[in-house]
Amino acid sequence: MTALPLEKARQIIDAAFAKGADLKLKPLGVSVLDAGGHLVAFQRQDGASFLRPQMSAGKAYGALAIGMGSRKVEAFAKERPHLVAGISDVSGGRVLPVVGGVLIRDKAGAIIGAVGISGDTSDNDETAAIAGIEAAGFTADPG
């Protein structure tokens, strides 16, 4: 059994969209990745631009690749841009070091995946990701 089943990924997405509606956010794209960086689920709202799949997945992938929420990844990129550029290169350009990627932790504190959201401001994207993760019964780690 996977630590992050599709049913839980769908719960995360639904709750993130609900939070976006509550906050009147722009249309969102939400990617849920497992701990290995593999896509479990993606959905975008009507009106979300065409790069939302790549952008949201890049935020989540970066959080997983570096082992910290993308809030810290973004700060890390500002402090050590050459290192983050190298990480992006070795990942095939999959890392997007921008706020909006949040690690998913289980009850024991282990990282079981990440959520990346793109569509509104980075802070609002992160808020929706945290809401989705918590609604599914996990702990959100934004960094």
Image: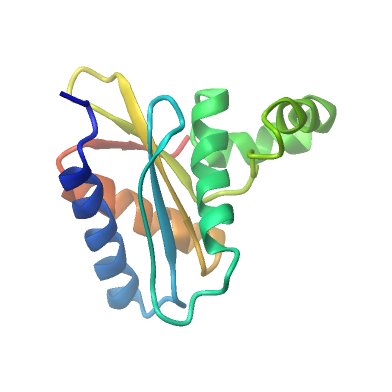
Report the number of discs: 0
Indicate the position of residue 61 as horizontal and vertical percent values.
53, 37
Indicate the position of residue 121 as horizontal and vertical percent values.
55, 66
Say above or below: 28 vs 9.
Answer: below
Indicate the position of residue 89 as horizontal and vertical percent values.
77, 31
- The picture quadrant where one finds residue 97 is top right
Say above or below: 59 vs 141.
Answer: below
Indicate the position of residue 140 as horizontal and vertical percent values.
32, 39
Which residue: 34% across, 70% down?
A: 20
Which is nearer the eye, 25 or 29? 29
Instruction: Classify residue 19 as left or right of residue 37.
Output: left
Which residue: 19% across, 53% down?
A: 11
Colouring: rainbow
Say above or below: 100 vs 2.
Answer: below
Say above or below: 86 vs 20.
Answer: above
Which residue: 67% across, 29% down?
A: 91
Quadrant of the frame with the N terminus? top left
Which is nearer the eye, 7 or 111? 7
Which is nearer the eye, 40 or 80? 40
Instruction: Classify residue 70 as left or right of residue 103.
Output: right
Which residue: 58% across, 70% down?
A: 50
